[in-house]
Image (spheres, grey):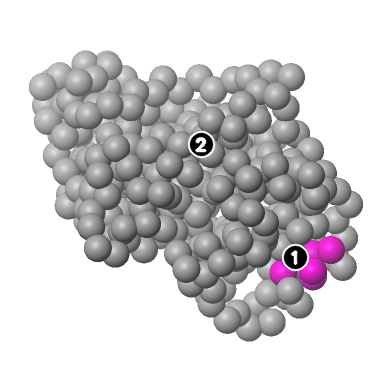
Amino acid sequence: MHFYMPAKVYSEKNCVLNHAEELAALGTHALLVTGRSSAEKNGSLQDVIDALTKGGVKYTHFNEVEENPSTETVMKARDAGVNAGCDFVIGIGGGSPMDAAKAIALMIKNKDAQADYLFDAAKPTQAIPLALIPTTCGTGSESTPYSIITRHELKTKQALPHKVFAALSLIDGKYLATAPAHVLTDTTTDALAHFFESFVNVKATDYSRLCVVKGLEIWKRSQQLLQHLDTEKPSEEALFDMLNASMIAGMAITHTGTSLPHGLSYALTYNTGMPHGKACGFFMPGYLREADKDMASEVLRMAGFTDTDDLERHYEITCGRDTVDTVVLEMSVQDLLSNPAKLSQAPFKVDETVLRRVVGV
Ligand SMILES: [Fe+2]
């Protein structure tokens, strides 16, 4: 059993400005990696610029990260960073900018390498320093070493074999305040999937389950506060709860990895555009129905659900269950069957028949 999560994490109001010195100390010229506009809207980009300016650190802004970022985007950002002389990366946003930032930090360090370096497990992992600032509450990328990148040539998303932790992760609930309701429900569903898939996992240990137990307590509290999302804005306390639950879920999957719902979700997202959390949630009840009954009951109870039907109802109310073409679900099954590492994460025998039951085809 081991526990290793070397990212230094601060979670507090005005976090970026409070820790401006530590952020600026990571290098002399930062590549800021964001999506098109949300980092501007929620104030995180300006806080980072103020922190860097205060510390006399230059920056270059790359704001072209799309949802489910591709290898091509990573390479474009690498070129921008190398040309500007960037020596560290700050990823600001949801899972897409943060995962892209990890891949970009790898490619800037390996500035002469081709894109296939990203997916080559035989190559050593080398990256320039990285800071992450989450502005959604699902991925936990700020506390995981994982980066999921879209490979159009394979028509799916894939986890890099290189494991890259942030040196510094800065969490502030105020960046969630402008997120649309559907982003909050989608990303909190992703965090829930991380808890479930980490708990029901062949690699689960007392250390990883410690994260699930406390993290789900915080997640459940945030959901109780979220129930009024349609009529009122979430409180500052609820926003911090959502972000902290997401970060702790990241700590859990850092030690176990995810399992079938995530493995099935990649092709579903690629083929339908369904958001990541919603796609993982789509397969969650089916996964828990296949698991050991006591184990599934225990983790459902911790999250506040009576059983898998109750979880299914929650998913339908929060995310809405889409009708998905069986051809697309077939692609998810076949995609996962070609990923033995992900299949082996489930603590029960998984074959095509089991996968079909999970998926419902
Ligand atoms: Fe996820």
Helix, strand or loop under label 2: helix
Q: Which residues are magenta?
A: 354-359
Q: Nearer the viewer, residue 352 or 318?
A: 318
Q: Given the image, on which type of amino acid does mark 2 rest? A: Glu
| Structural crowding at the residue carrying mark 1, measured as other residues with C-alpha within 10 Å and reported as few (<14), some (14–19) or many (≥20) | many
Which residue occupies 47% across, 42% down? 219
Of badges 1 and 2, the one in the foreground is: 2
Q: Is residue 357 magenta?
A: yes
Q: Is residue 39 magenta?
A: no
Q: Quadrant of residue 13?
A: top left
Task: Locate the C terminus by quadrant.
Answer: bottom right
Q: Is residue 6 above or below residue 351?
A: above
Which residue occupies 80% across, 57% down? 290
| Structural crowding at the residue carrying mark 2, measured as other residues with C-alpha within 10 Å and reported as few (<14), some (14–19) or many (≥20) | some
Q: Nearer the viewer, residue 220 or 31?
A: 220
Query: In the figure, is residue 53 to the left or right of 342?
Result: left
Query: In the figure, is residue 2 to the left or right of 28?
Result: right
* Residue 339 badge: none
Precedes in sequence: disc 1 or disc 2:
2
Check if mark 1's residue and mark 2's residue have beta carbons within 8 Å.
no
Q: Given the image, on which type of amino acid does mark 1 rest? A: Val
Q: Which residue is mark 1?
A: 358
* Residue 217 badge: 2
